[in-house]
Image (cartoon, coloured by chain):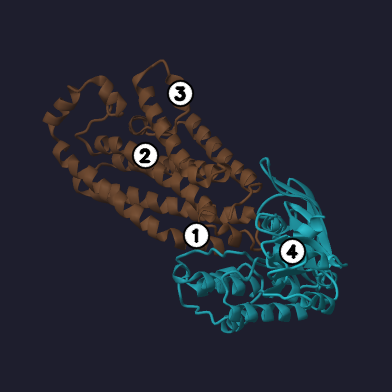
Amino acid sequence: MNIVARELRSNLKSLLIWSGSLIAVIVMMLSEFSAYYNNPDMAQIMNSMPKALMDAFSMSNANLTTVSGYVSITVVYVNLMLGIFAVLLGNSIIAKEERDKTAGFLMTMPVTRTKILIGKIIAAAINCLIVLVVVIGSLYLFTLKYNPDQDFYRFLWLVAVTTGIFEIMFLSLGLFLASSVKRYKLSSGVGLGILFSLYVLSVLVALSDKIDFLKYVTPFKYYEASKLLQNNGIEGTYLILSFIWAISFTALTFIVYNKRDLRA
Amino acid sequence: MNIIEINQLTKFYGKVKGIENVSFNVKEGEIFGFIGPNGAGKSTTIRTLLGLIFPTSGSAKLFGKDCIEFGSKIRSEIGYLPSEVFYYEKMKVKDLLKYSASFYKKDCTKRINELSEIMELNLNRRIEDLSYGNKKKVGIVQGLLHEPKLIMLDEPTSGLDPLMQQKFFDIISEENKKGSTVFFSSHILSEVQHLCNRVAIIKDGHVIKVEDIKTLREDNYKKVTVKGESLDSNLYSFEGVSQLTSFDHMLNFFYKGDVNFLIETIGKQKVQDILIEDPSLEEIFMHYYK
């Protein structure tokens, strides 16, 4: 527990900065909505846009003049940001001990690396949860003035759950990279590289039918907001894939980190 | 009883050799010196014992238990002071020490206060504001606050002024008298000579000698330099002189034997300058290499 407390404290500043920035981004995104809200002209304009463009930004099914429709297109960007947050957090919470050469202190304490990892993962998960609450809370608060219906809140709840799963997936990726990439300076870059590649892949999958099977590869395709909005549910296949991804990376983290030679 | 038992310990970093087939034992209550030049493998050995890195082959036991398998348990009895200390920069000294103490199953408050007082450490400062020497003091307090049975020091005195070094050695001697075993790496022979009972000498990843400090002292060669206009190097071809070289009105040699006889010999000629010193560690190694 001392490790959890220590990690929460040391990540507090970064958590506040991230939370503040995310609130600001959401406020900006939703402020655009007032131009779309109940505005048939806008719907006309959107309909005249090329289909491919709308597909690429996963906007083809969204009715931007309703709260649900508008929020649904912001979800992919929220996911992208929280993915960045999670993968960087997962990476830094482990790699920083070597980066700051404090591994020589922490790892010579009478505690196993497994326990250190558990403490760090708990702290990271709490950070992810807080950021999620901040994001969903902002979406809730700043749409109140449009009096959204029950369906919107049901949708928002699904977004919260799926974004949480999405965060855990990228957190586990970050943990794994920090423990397995030999040069700790590289691991955060590798993590961000993978994240953006998967995002680009999801855009490509939307554009081309031929690579449809790749939708199972990129988590950006797992819980698309348009699907959540229409089906009102999460698909079991993707849920299973998500758990396999998160559990595998977390398990590998424990295996690899317990054998890692620590610098410093 | 052996507190440290190292058996054929080998560590390669990829293809680069760290240490190879290192074996020696440290007995309970000993102050054991581990000397060698930079890059000889001192830190590699210590870091393996602490479980920071994993051996390529061979094994080591601390308190009779394997240092990897029982690492976390063993470490509750070890105090470690690295050559350069790094802590969480934003933390206050007080909080860092409390954090460190929280890993041990005992109350360390009293010992923290005692040690901080001796080392004249300001507990309210942030780690990032501390000088190198002050960080080292934090390291000393942190390494000893749980009254460890085995104290492992990796080049401990670098960065400490002579006064603090003395205090530090006093603390270490005191801990040793209370029963702690001390394992101590250094490249400064004189430091080791004062304190240790036995030493292991390591070079290029191999332990080349494990010896009683008394024997090492007896074998102690002196390095002699004599300057003069007309020196006859033939005068110095007596027992105990080795590696005699002469150039530019200067004679250099190593001497082991009766100092009076040496001075008598030097006195036979007109000498401008004379220097008799302890050989450097490198020169002692050269001796062990022969």
Q: CA distance from mark 1 to mark 2?
A: 24 Å
Q: Amino acid at mark 3?
A: Leu
Q: CA distance from mark 1 to mark 3?
A: 37 Å
Up/down of B269 relative to A259, above or below: below
Chain letter for cyan, please: B
Q: Amino acid at mark 1?
A: Glu
Q: In this figure, which residue is indicated by the disc labeled 1?
A: A7
Q: In this figure, which residue is indicated by the disc labeled 2?
A: A80
Q: CA distance from mark 4 to mark 3?
A: 58 Å
Q: CA distance from mark 4 to mark 1?
A: 36 Å
Q: Are marks 1 and 2 on the same chain?
A: yes
Local secondary structure at mark 1:
helix
Q: In this figure, which residue is indicated by the disc labeled 3?
A: A214
Kindly tell me whether residue B27 is visible in this rendering. no
Q: Colour of chain A?
A: brown
Q: Chain of mark 4?
A: B
Seen at 48% across and 40% down, the residue is A169
Q: Nearer the viewer, residue A163 or A96?
A: A96
Up/down of A10 relative to B118, above or below: above
How far across and down, in percent of the image, does residue A24 sit? 26, 50
Q: Chain of mark 3?
A: A
Q: Are marks 3 and 2 on the same chain?
A: yes
Which mark sits nearer the N-terminus, 1 or 3?
A: 1
Q: Amino acid at mark 4?
A: Phe
Q: Are marks 4 and 1 on the same chain?
A: no
How far across and down, in percent of the image, does residue A113 sit? 63, 54
In which quadrant is the C terminus of chain B drawn? bottom right
